[in-house]
Amino acid sequence: MLASTNNPTSLPAVAPSSRPMNMIGKPKSPIFPKRLDHYTLICRNAKDVAEFHTKFLQFELDSIKPVNTGTVSKGGHDMLNYILRPPANKDMLMVVTEGLNDETIFRKYIRAHGHGIHHFAFEVDEIETVFAAIKERGVQTTSEKVTKDIISGLKQFFIAPSHAGFFIEMIERPRWESGIDMRKQSATTDRDELFTSNNMAELAQSISRFVYPKTAQCLSQILDCHEEKKKEERAREDIVANVMAGVDVGTIAAIEIAVVNLSSSVSFLVDVLNFRFIRQMDEKMLVGVPGASKSVGIILKQARSTKEERKAAVVFNAPNLTPRKLEEASRANFVDIIENGVIGITLPDEHATYKVVLVSPAENVTSNQVVRSYPSFFNLEVDLRANLADLMTFLVDPRNLSTWTGHRSIHYCTKLNSWVETRSNDSGGLIDFILEVKVEEGSTVSFCWPERKTEVAFRCSEGPSGYCSLSVELPSTLSERTLVQMKQIISVELNLLKSIMERNTQDVVPAQFYQQIEAYHMNICGIEKKRLLPNDAAEAFGFRGKVLTRGSLFEQMSMDFALTITSRPQMVLVPIDVADVQAAVKMANAYNIPLAARGSQVSHSAGGQAQADRGIVLDMSTLSKVEFSGSEDSAVVKVGAGTYWDEVIRQTLHYGLMPPVVNDYQYLSVGGTISMGGVGFMSHQYGIQAAHVDEIEMVTGLGDHFVCSKENQKDLFDCARGGLGQCGIITSVIIPLVKAPKTIRTYKLFYPACNSSVFLKDVKIFVSCGQIDMIHAFLKPCTKTSIASILGPDAYDASSTKFKKLVQDGESNKSLVYFLELACYLWGDVSVSTLENSKGIPNLLLSKQNAFLNGEYFTNEADFSSYIRKDPPVVETNNEHGKVPHPSFATLIDEHQAPTLLDYHLASNARGDDSTNEILIMPVKSNSSLSCGHNVPMFPIPKGSELSFFLLFLGSVIPKPKGDNNDPNAPSCSDQMSTIRAHHRKLYSLSIKIGGKRYSYDTITAEVKGEKAWKEHFGCHETWERLVLQKRKFDPNHILCPGVDMWKDDCSRTAPEKGYHSTG
């Protein structure tokens, strides 16, 4: 240890500040670019370049604008502009400009600098004030006044390239179009001009004196020389087409520009235009637009030659970029190492006029995050535009902690001869903790609280002249949730420290950062602070769908299906597309509040899994498109996540097709059941629905859009299926289709419930014979009413006298029966007798007749569509009694242990009314035994089981009847609920004891909380760690799906004591 700062007399002369953070540093400047508005290319042939962007990069053509800049007579035009929209940046434009004769400034520019990006334009407010402030700083502009269009109100001016190293345009759009979605421009206004001819002409004339031609050769001669080259370009265009086939072009992640003087350019952008310095990247610098916390990054690099000066590249995210596609691009020499070993597709500038780079969002090293995790999840690092000596001097003064951390009560105690921090204790009293600040070798500053046995070290390192880095490593022994909270708070604090050291707190640190620090410190003192969303939060993040804060749908979204949990969100958002889902996730991250996606308005999650208390609930029902592709033998369907399975089945059956596995209830959302697993009629043959998904589109917990599959982003693909929404929100899936029958033959059997083993043994025999296409069963009361409702009155009346006598005896004894229903597909003109003889069904049933009631079974032919779309018993109960609470417990249990759980239930007096509390039973084939589909590692099954039984113990709380029929001894609703839930908890405990795995949509949520419980649930350590890694990568702030309660603190790891804080 080199020094200790425990005595105030030894402190360096650094004045602490108790002023609000927005008053620290330099005065507020009117120069505040809000966003990248557009970028402009100058090229030889605007039509070809525009066509390349629309054909291969998925841009959309907005308009074509001819302009006269003064080299031709009035009424003509010498400038042609193609205005395009990038595919996923709704508030940005690209302009492709061509000069039509050799006297235009554009052809002169090409002779001097070649084709490519000419300038970048940033939107500002009050452009006249910005112009005056820039001129006051001595900045050279291409004109002495702001260019204005009187009719539209559009205002613009250029900053000369001598400052930033390239042309910068400042633009103020009229109120009616500023900050709007450019895609809605024409639809929402009477004006269709995003740029005006007058402004374009005047701006073009203003840059003429900043172009220095290198040769007198006219461009027409140059174009002639390039005829042969054009032929080569057209040949290479075919290669580009092959490389880009199937690649979706997403948002613009970053723009890279080569400048003459890297240090000077960064200084101008940061010191004058108030861009945020983010970090060093080898020999490059990354800066960000100050008006957006997560915007397009601007990478500046040193030009190595005059030829490279002002050359630019644009980095696009490609959500479905696969390793196979990279390999294909590599063979065409269209692959390059972008940064830190990350590989991306790189298209040469001969077509677009600038280098186009496509990378996977997961590998995007140009992330515009100020504080980042590097090199490990437990390490936080930030780059500062400050001297190392100044940083060290600031850090070692304990008084300065109050300016950048939540430690507000630090003072020097003469009695203890030490610095202390005062904290509240559990009883409301105040405790002083000694604080030591140590400076160790290697420029490390440590903050120590000896009494609390906590210490955290900040490692400082020197970079290029005027730059340094700061990093801190968090303890790896913390639980995931505590670790996330600490990372969030330390990230905020490092943001604040960076702002102070760079003397730039002007809107760099959003207001919600201060709210997070305040909330954190109030919470650790036992005071809960609500995090409230501003009323305009959704609009501010570009959300365009409905925003609900009250009303019937809002109330409906506040309840779970079981009516057991009420969690009121702050907002219910109804997105219109994937971009809205991204906006909602980014908003939740910005305000650090939870978000849950709810697949349908009647979500069947029964324990609050699809709710977000005081957070945001997304109603995904609007994402319901169904699209078919492929041939008859290999057809697939792309389905929006909010689509009901009923709609999927209705449309696929129209073509004689269906998904491989169909639920027993179709008014569930596709995204919901895929996230959960999805058990259905065919699960005994084909496993769960999640095993039959070929591709998933999703929005991660960071708001990034991904397309994942077995070949692309496999870890994310695996965590999306059966992963309970922990890493992302599914927006659509691609499902392979199989041939569907029109008619089925059903077989209904009734087994006495007194012998569960016999019943389940027969079910296994029916499964193993391979001839039964659909199987499900229920536990039902052995009453005439119950049996007749299953068979139909006519079929019951036609049954044998002995069968009816057995039912009558069962009703007298209050007995139960297992109702088993088997179904076989009838194909084409095949007769029933032919079907049964070929499958051997009669002989099979005959061999089992001693097991079911009177050896009697009931057959019927049914329409397949009507059969699978009928309502299950729980819906029938709702229809009869109104919407009532449905507490439930669901589990998958090994075939050998299932009788134990069923017999325990039957022996219990606490199971409730058998007429409304039922059991659904479905055999499920394990993932490892499937002959088709994909393994689902996140869907836990009993260890070693080839066949499991899905058991759903479903309760119904029926209110007492009113009036004369009221039974004074009938239990109240609260008593019924308590009894049923207590019984379910006992079933859950027994299930776990005998190796069962809970199916996680039920109401058993209080018993399964925290990492320890969920780690046991997933069973395999490797599976759990895989989920943890993907959670850290794709939802590091733990925003998504909070109702699952997967990341609560527990005793499985060393958790910090109450009052422990990130920097102490």
Image (cartoon, rainbow, N blue to C red):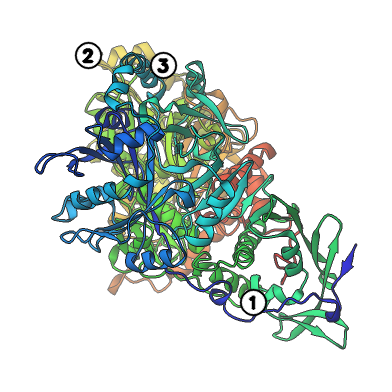
Within-10-Å neighbours for mark 1: few <14, some 14–19, many 20+? some
The residue carrying mark 2 is 829
Give the camera-side residue of 365 and 839. 365
Give the camera-side residue of 41 and 183. 41
Q: Residue furthest right?
A: 1
Q: Residue furthest left?
A: 75
Q: Residue furthest front?
A: 216
56 vs 83, left or right, is: right
Q: What's the amino acid at mark 1?
A: Gly
Residue positioned 29% across, 52% down in the render: 181
Q: Is residue 875 above or below residue 396?
A: above
Give the camera-side residue of 853 and 587. 587
Give the camera-side residue of 109 and 183. 109
User: Foreground mark, 3 or 2?
Assistant: 2
Q: Is residue 814 above or below residue 567?
A: above
Within-10-Å neighbours for mark 3: few <14, some 14–19, many 20+? few
Q: What's the amino acid at mark 3?
A: Asn
The Cα–Cα distance between marks 3 and 2, rounded to whole angstroms, is 23 Å
Q: Secondary structure at mark 2?
A: loop
The residue carrying mark 3 is 843
Within-10-Å neighbours for mark 2: few <14, some 14–19, many 20+? few
The residue carrying mark 1 is 526
